[in-house]
Image: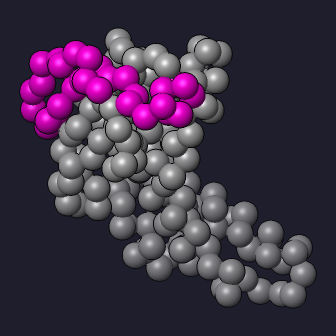
Amino acid sequence: MFDKAYVHFKHLFSLTKMGVFWVTRAKDSMRYHICKKRKVSGNIVRDDEITLKTKSSKEYYPQRMQRVVARVEVNGKTVEMVFINNNMDWAASSICDLYQSRWAIEVFFKQIKQTLQICDFLGHSIKPSVGNSGPRYCCICFFVFKHGTRTGHIASHASLR
């Protein structure tokens, strides 16, 4: 899973040649040709096999890839997102599920960073900081594991601070 800021077709094709499957969001400026349209249902708006159109992109990534347009929930809102990947066997819904899992992990680490504020640590050396953060980190992980918390709930629990 890559963020769309890191879409470099030369790198993606090297991963494909190594047998690595990948999923990323497509850049808005990506130019492509639709080779095949697939059936869609539910929150999937489009599911196409594509090739890249621009000369340099086509040179860097000469094979077909899958382009999926889907309505997904991000931060409690439904938005339309465009994904590309190199595995033609994956269902479009699976690609959306992978991205939502990636998003949940990103939100989880953001919450940990907000909860473990550096200004809350005591001492002026690394030793007290590490001593304070270790138990907090363990408490947060235990809380998430035990309660299966969703986004927004970790930072609101003062007992973790």
Task: Please indicate whether residue 63 sits to the left or right of residue 41 in the image.
Answer: right
Q: Give percent across and percent down for residue 97.
A: 32, 35
Which residue is painted at 56% across and 39% down in the image?
8
Q: Which residues are magenta?
A: 33-61
- The picture places residue 12, in percent across and down from the top left corner, at 56, 30
The reply, left or right, for residue 154 in relation to residue 130 is: left
Q: Name the quarter where the C terminus is drawn.
A: bottom right
- The answer to which image quadrant residue 53 occupies is top left
Provide residue 102's location: percent of width, then percent of height: 45, 44
Q: Nearer the viewer, residue 87 or 143?
A: 87
Q: Determine if the magenta segment contains residue 48.
A: yes
Question: Is 27 situated above or below 53?
Answer: below
Residue plotted at (34% across, 50% down): 28
Q: In this rendering, would 40 be left or right of 156?
A: left
**Can you name the residue that lies furthest to the front here?**
55
Vertical side of 17 occupied by 160: above or below: below
**Viewer-nearest residue: 144 or 32:** 32
Q: Is residue 100 magenta?
A: no
Q: Residue furthest left?
A: 41
Q: How many marks?
A: 0
